[in-house]
Image (cartoon, rainbow, N blue to C red):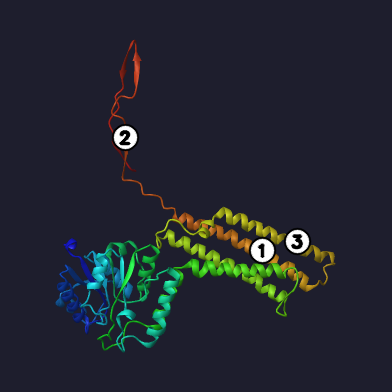
Amino acid sequence: MSSDVEVTVLLPCLNEAETLETCVRKALRSLAELGVQGEVLVSDNGSTDGSQEIAVRSGARVVHAPRKGYGAALITGIAEARGRYVIMADADDSYDLSHLGPFIDKLREGHDVVMGNRFRGGISPGAMPFLHRYLGNPVLSWLGRALFGLKGIGDFHCGIRGFDRDRIRDLDLRMPGMEFASELVVRASLNGYDMTEVPTTLQPDGRSRAPHLRTWRDGWRHLRFLLVFSPRRTLVWPGLIVFLLGLIGTARLATGSRHVAGVEFDVNALVYACLAVLVGAQLMLFGGFAELYGRFEGLVRDDRPSRWARWLTFERCIMIGLSLMALGLTGTIIAVTNWGQAGFGELDPRGTIRLVLPSATAIALGVIGVFSGLFASLLTLRGMRTAPLPKKIVRTVPRQPVGGTRSGTGTHTVPVPESEPIPRS
């Protein structure tokens, strides 16, 4: 019975015939020594080297993951796991599955996720490529801590980790590739899960073939995922800085050239200042959209978006957008009037640009604002999912008489039928 299983050791597998039996037997022996009721579950991703038979012969249970990918195999395994806790690890014998006690102890203490830390536990020579050890893992782990506030997690991408099965199922994890490792940590952090880590060791894997991991491809996938899931820090705040710098530059240069440290800034700089205004505004809007989308799609279980995301209403964007368009059109009319007063001949190009360029920028911002409000409204409507109707609607009617008619000097009551279900059409 699944209720009798406390721990599931989950091994994703794709052609791991050389090392799978060793991993399964180590995990089973560790569970037995600890007196833990558990199982080893192999989530096979289409092996063609007999890994499935080896797993069954070694004492593991095997499930088939139909979709290809490291994350897809783990998602299937988590769905099929019988244990209250799941400890996932690679099936290449690089992690020491004979010492599962620290992970189980932390899970029993109530932590939702327990990460392994290879840098604290020890990395054997040749176990991790130079770029992974001194560039990829440290940089991505630092970025993860900076973006998501995970100060206690030093090894963001360790392949062995434990977690509460039901809590992780609630996250509805989706990434099918290697970036699943980042998704689990990021989504758990964004949803306020209790996370900790324990030291673990890393040994050279026991396979004769090349590993499935591809340094640059999978590193980029991890980086992309970290950036996408932190729109406030990667889009909104940088966009705000660029927007303000552009706005200040536009305001200063629209009235004349400026000298800074002996360098003259004129209409050429004004062009780039206006460009910064447009780019900064777009970044902020994209960040707000990303935040709204993440909440409406259930990627983050937080019913209260940031103040900026809440500000993006259709009515507000329409009002500000139309105001900016009116301001820009006013500047354009003034510029055309000045041109007409000069007989539609040549004008001072610098003076004209100082009026026309900010006006065109205001019109562009207004158009962006109007359509951004429309898009934000569509996202909001997407998130307004009504509750499903019940299969039966029960009409409750009082059992006691509720009315009467007079007949002469007396009264008699009109009986009312008891409650009855009204079938839904």
Instruction: Indicate the position of residue 50 as horizontal and vertical percent values.
Output: 20, 81
Is residue 225 shown to the viewer in this render?
A: no
Q: Residue at x 29, y 24 (%)?
A: 415
Label 2 secondary element: loop
Q: Which residue is mark 2?
A: 396
> Disc 3 or 1, which lies upstream in sequence?
3
Front residue of 339/307: it is: 307
For residue 362, which numbered disc appears in the image? 1
Image side of residue 30 versus residue 66, left or right: left
Front residue of 244/108: it is: 108
Instruction: Indicate the position of residue 65 as horizontal and vertical percent values.
Output: 27, 71
Q: Which residue is mark 3?
A: 333
Instruction: Indicate the position of residue 62 as horizontal and vertical percent values.
Output: 20, 72
Q: Residue at x 37, y 71 (%)?
A: 152
Image side of residue 270 versus residue 143, left or right: right
Q: Residue at x 73, y 62 (%)?
A: 331
Label 1 secondary element: helix
Picture quadrant of residue 320: bottom right
